[in-house]
Image (cartoon, grey):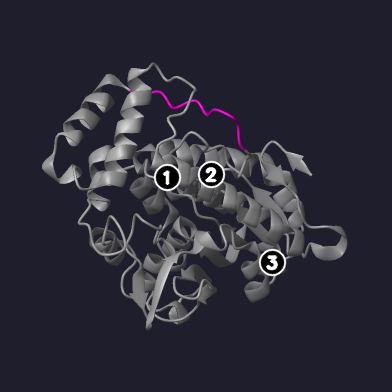
């Protein structure tokens, strides 16, 4: 059943009622769109619906780590809405390591500052992060060891972040094999499972997506960035910025510019959407939320307020279904 971004996927007696009104969350990947997870968490907290475990992929693993490490929701929301475009760019400044555009040093520093040096096995909340073994192609469920390393492995977006070497293996983004890990959440922690899907294509595809409106100041900032010497060797980032600027200068035309990076992004989105559909047929979550974050690009972390609002809207709309799922 699909109702305005809410999918109730479990059938018959499959849906399980949690003890004491608790839920298991499966938080999906999607870059900046994943800030919507915080909005969902806010609504659950306001209704005193406890979360006993989280399985996360990519940004879902990061948000899940914030929760599992004890960060207050108010701090998460403040952090998510404090990023402007300059601070966002600082996290992704290209240093051109082997295997990617960004080494991830700045992101690791950010994670160490926000999460700390704790171990997964010492967390008060059940937690696993999903990553992909680059050499074998297998799904890896990271359930022990340093929390920061698990998150860094899970968010290693191919061709953007260099693969993360950890425990003798090279890891890339968990979204390559499992964009929304509801099956792992159920297998590891039971149910009921509430999944939140924010990957591109989670709500379907349209032939031409309308680019979001941009201000003149935003366009001028992009032009200044494109003049910087370090941007020239960063081909993927440069192409993405040029595409955003071109759409802005053309008055937000709906016809996309199919440059190499956008083609690759679209192919990955299609693949992820198909993967989620297939996994849903095998091990569906009890509830799937798909917040309306389609207009937010993966790297637009400065749009945190919009993403949080979308997550809140999806969770609030689904509240009757969620309450029934936890036995209230």
In the picture as drawn, the residue positioned furthest to the left comes out as 229
Residue situated in front as seen by the camera: 177 or 77:
177
In the picture as drawn, the residue positioned furthest to the top comes out as 251
Q: Secondary structure at mark 2?
A: loop
Q: Which residues are magenta?
A: 205-214
Q: Disc 2 versus disc 1: distance between alpha carbons?
A: 9 Å
Disc 2 versus disc 3: nearer the observer:
2
| Residue 43 percent coordinates (x, y) | 57, 47
* Residue that badge 1 annotates: 298
Reading the chain from its start, which is encountered first: label 2 or label 3? 3
Task: Locate residue 88: give its quadrant.
Answer: top left
Q: Secondary structure at mark 1?
A: loop
* Residue that badge 3 annotates: 20
Q: Identify the residue at horizontal 37%, vertical 52% (top origin).
A: 75
Quadrant location, the N terminus: top right
| Residue 246 percent coordinates (x, y) | 33, 25
Q: Main secondary structure of the magenta part?
A: loop
Q: Disc 3 versus disc 1: distance between alpha carbons?
A: 36 Å
Q: What is the number of the mark on residue 124?
A: none
Q: Disc 2 versus disc 3: distance between alpha carbons?
A: 34 Å
Q: Is residue 62 left or right of residue 317?
A: left
Reading the chain from its start, which is encountered first: label 2 or label 1? 2
Residue situated in front as seen by the camera: 204 or 262:
262
* Residue that badge 2 annotates: 200
Task: Locate residue 98: give its quadrant.
Answer: bottom left
| Residue 187 percent coordinates (x, y) | 67, 73
User: Eyeballing the image, is 38 above or below 228?
Assistant: below
Labelled pair 2, 1 in contact (Cβ < 8 Å): yes
Q: Is residue 29 visible?
A: yes
């Amino acid at each position: 059943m699909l109702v305005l971004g809410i999918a109730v996927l479990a059938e018959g007696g499959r849906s399980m009622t949690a003890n004491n009104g608790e839920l298991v969350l499966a938080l999906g990947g999607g870059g900046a769109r994943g800030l919507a997870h915080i909005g969902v968490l806010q609504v659950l907290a306001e209704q005193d619906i406890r979360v006993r475990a989280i399985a996360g992929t990519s940004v879902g693993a990061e948000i899940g780590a914030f929760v599992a490490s004890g960060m207050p929701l108010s701090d998460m929301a403040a952090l998510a809405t404090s990023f402007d475009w300059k601070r966002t760019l600082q996290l992704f400044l290209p240093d051109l390591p082997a295997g990617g555009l960004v080494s991830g040093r700045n992101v690791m520093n950010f994670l160490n500052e926000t999460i700390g040096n704790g171990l997964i096995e010492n967390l008060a909340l059940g937690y696993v992060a999903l990553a992909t073994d680059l050499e074998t192609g297998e799904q890896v469920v990271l359930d022990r060891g340093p929390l920061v390393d698990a998150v860094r492995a899970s968010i290693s977006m191919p061709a953007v972040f260099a693969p993360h070497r950890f425990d003798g293996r090279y890891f890339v983004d968990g979204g390559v094999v499992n964009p929304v890990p509801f099956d792992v959440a159920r297998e590891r922690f039971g149910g009921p499972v509430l999944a939140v899907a924010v990957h591109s294509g989670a709500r379907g595809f349209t032939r031409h997506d309308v680019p979001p409106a941009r201000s003149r100041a935003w366009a001028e900032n992009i032009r200044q960035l494109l003049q910087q010497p370090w941007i020239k060797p960063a081909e993927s980032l440069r192409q993405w910025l040029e595409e955003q600027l071109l759409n802005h200068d053309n008055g937000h035309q709906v016809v996309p510019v199919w440059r190499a990076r956008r083609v690759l992004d679209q192919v990955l989105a299609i693949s992820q959407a198909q993967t989620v559909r297939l996994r849903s047929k095998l091990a569906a979550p009890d509830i799937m939320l798909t917040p309306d974050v389609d207009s937010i690009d993966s790297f637009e972390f400065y749009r945190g307020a919009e993403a949080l609002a979308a997550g809140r809207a999806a969770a609030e709309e689904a509240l009757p279904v969620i309450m029934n799922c936890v036995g209230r």
